[in-house]
Image (tube, rainbow, N blue to C red):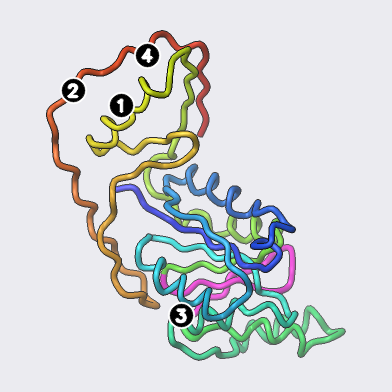
Amino acid sequence: MTATAAILTIGNEIVSGDVPNTNASWLARQLASLGVAVRMAAALPDEIEAVAEYVRTEGPCVDFLFVTGGLGGTPDDLTREAIAAAFAVPQEEVRELAADLRGRFAGDPEYAARWALLPRGSRPLANPLGGAPGFAIGNVYVLPGLPSEMEAMFLGVADEFRSGSPIGAWRRVYRTRESLIAPVLAEAGEAGTPQWQSGNPLLPPGPPCPALSPSPTPSAPTPSAPTRPPRPRPQLGTPTSETTSR
């Protein structure tokens, strides 16, 4: 069964459209190359309860939930608090991490040490290009919002998400009409075949979502789609071009 993921980007500047959400598209491409299908990508403002509710609701529905943004030290950086609220655990200082941050940022050591206040049960994730560490708790991976830091941190743990063969994509261009192509796509969907249509994944429905847990649990198998008798397939003609990517 294909592993699944959701991506949550946090930031008022993302929701307002002032800053493009490049983190989500980059993560989705990386996850596809690791064999992980992204079921949802969302953006939320810097609000503790909104983020916590999303994590509580969507985290149990996927194998991995990636959260980016809100790990700095400004008043609107509330992601650590939001994830702690989602898991109903307190924040605790990771002593070794706090000591390392104080040593690295001797100019304002206590400011940097606040980045070590992680939700209880978290595993710190190293930030090779910056200061604030990420962390993982349960199936939730929290990464920085700055793209360069987010990408470096993700690549450092990417092997943890590898699941089967990479998800490839191909595109064919036909001289035809949408009304002829739509039944072909519908037939593939009824047969339970994962497909990509206009850049959007059409995947079989997943199992009901369990409760959020700090400890990862294996996902239940996806029920197979009922078989239906085949129907005539429209003739689309010869493709005028074809591209393939991974």
Q: Residue at x 30, y 66 (%)?
A: 209
Query: Which residue type carries mark 2?
Result: Arg
- For the point 48% across and 34% down, which residue is it? 198
Q: Tell me where residue 124 sits by quadrant.
A: bottom right
* Circle 1: residue type: Pro
Between discs 4 and 2, the one toward the N terminus: 2
User: Vertically, is 178 above or below 46?
Assistant: above
Q: Quickly name the residue at label 3.
A: 86
* 1 or 2: tag closer to the N-terminus: 1
Number of numbered labels in the structure image: 4
Q: Which mark is residue 183?
A: 1
Label 1 SS: helix
User: What span is in magenta?
Assistant: 122-138
Residue under the point 66% across and 74% down: 71
> What residue appears at the point 24 percent right and 60 percent down from the top-left corner?
220
Helix, strand, or loop for circle 4? loop
Labels 4 and 2 touching (C-beta < 8 A): no
Q: Is residue 132 left or right of residue 158?
A: right
Check whether the beta carbons of the residues at disc 1 and disc 2 lie within 8 A of each other: yes
Residue type at mark 4: give it.
Leu
Question: Dot 3 lies on which element?
Answer: helix
Q: CA distance from mark 1 to mark 2?
A: 9 Å
